[in-house]
Image (spheres, rainbow, N blue to C red):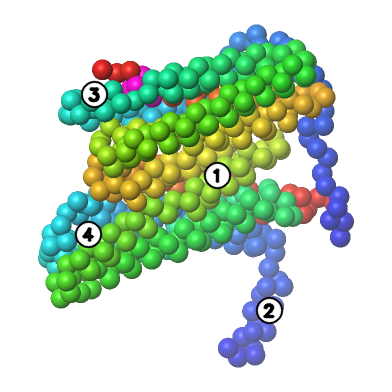
Amino acid sequence: MTMNAWPADPFASTPPKAPERRLREPGHVPGEIGIWVFIFGDLLIFALFFGVFVYERSRSAGLFEQAREHMNLTFGAGNTLLLLTGSLFVALGLNSLRHGASGPGSRMILVTLLCGFGFVVNKYLEYSNEIEAGHTPSTNGFFMYYFVFTGIHLLHLLLGMVALVIMYLIARKPALGSRDLRNLEAGACYWHLIDLLWIVLFALLYLMR
Amino acid sequence: MSTANVASTATGLSGSTEADRRSMSRNSQLLIAWCGPAMVVLFLIGSVWLARYFPPAIHPSDSAQQVAQYYQEHATAIRVGLVFSCLAYALMGVWGVCMAVQTRRKEGLFPALTYVQLTCMAAGTAQIVVNCGLWATAAFRAGEVSPEITQAFNDAAYIILLGTWMPFTIWAIALGLNILLDKSDAPVFPRWTGYFSIWAGVCFIPGGTVWFFKEGPFSWVGVVCLWVPFVVFGIWVLYFSYLSMQNVKRGFVHEQEPAVSS
């Protein structure tokens, strides 16, 4: 039996360089349709989370407001800044990669990865701070939502960092095919989702009075 | 079985044509695909109508006396409901094989992700069958033993049902990756369903909050902890059952691509 004879790679003939007009094609979906199914599915679940939070908050506004005043705005704002910077660099990186600039493109993805890493460190410091101050998920309703929602968001971010590592490896390839670009775009869209969810969380947990 | 019988069976086998084999494969694959909807129906009969653990009749903040009393008063309905429920979960194992058979067709000689699916699916089935046993244990001596014992078994069942989401999440992600890593023009399932399956796997994670909360949306009566994983799991099972049936009906039953090529 000739077990070692594999069929030819059907993608061997994909163009070595990404077609730049891909950007301007009408009806172009960034990444692919599937990643948007994931993103809107996730937004649906988080919309449910936010609805539950706002409803519960309206039932015990005094307690939520009192707990919110304990929140350290510096951590929250710092994390917002980190994620927005990360999103900017992943977008810039993708733009470079579309024009064949592998070096700058991959370095910008690395900057995004560093922003994500900074977010994790910041979150660790913030959690330790809250726990030291005696705030745990069982303290009251507000801190229950705070820990669970930011925890689930953190899990998304860690997944996003795995995606960024894969994106970095793709970006380092000497030439990008259309499949590579598709995967890069899908990863960048996912990173923007993390950013978007955080902005809503930031508003609900740190700012909403 | 007599020797004559064996001989005739053997002759029958050797005389079977490629068409016969395809037809058998087709029927068995349709059968296991239908286990998905069957599982959902049995779950509804067992858990929603009879045993009433979904949505939960017993709250995590109920006292031990309340729990024991509920079990005592509804012992028969709970036991019969759990039989249906357990049957549903057993069919989950069969349905898991259906997914594995579908993706195995394209994965090649070393189907790593299909093996991951099978292992996690089997582990998940085992644990979810066990939690039915725990509810049945609670019902077994409710009223005879001290209420705390009944309550503890009831707690344990929910804590396993929702808190052990890990094999299910890995299962759904493995199925999703099976679809997304397929580089051919004709993946087993539409490409977007790969992302859908990974999303479903992520949606099982909130079940883990059952370990930490006795009330609110993160407890076992909560919208985040209970409803999100169960509703998404139901949609996931039904949609992939439908896709598998479509595949079988289109005749994708007996081709194993890399093994056939030479």
Q: At which x and y percent is residue B260? A: 78, 53
| Nearest to viewer (mark 3 / mark 2) | 3
Residue at x 78% of width, y 15% of height: A100
Bin the neighbour count of mark 1 within 10 Å (Cα to Cα): few under 14, some 14-19, many 20 and up: many
Q: Secondary structure at mark 4?
A: helix
Can you tell which mark lies on residue A134?
A: none
Q: Quadrant of the N terminus of chain A?
A: bottom right
- Asked whether the viewer can see residue A188, the reply is no
Q: At which x and y percent is residue B152? A: 26, 64
Residue at which label 2 appears: B10
B160 is higher (above) or lower (below) than A59: below
Residue at x 48% of width, y 51% of height: B166
Highlighted magenta segment, given as a residue range: A201-206
Bin the neighbour count of mark 4 within 10 Å (Cα to Cα): few under 14, some 14-19, many 20 and up: many
Residue at which label 4 appears: B50
Q: Mark 3 near mark 1, Cβ–Cβ under 8 Å?
A: no
Distance from disc 1 to disc 2, alpha carbons, whole Å, reads 42 Å
Tell me which chain the residue with mark 4 is part of: B
Can you tell which mark lies on residue A65?
A: 3
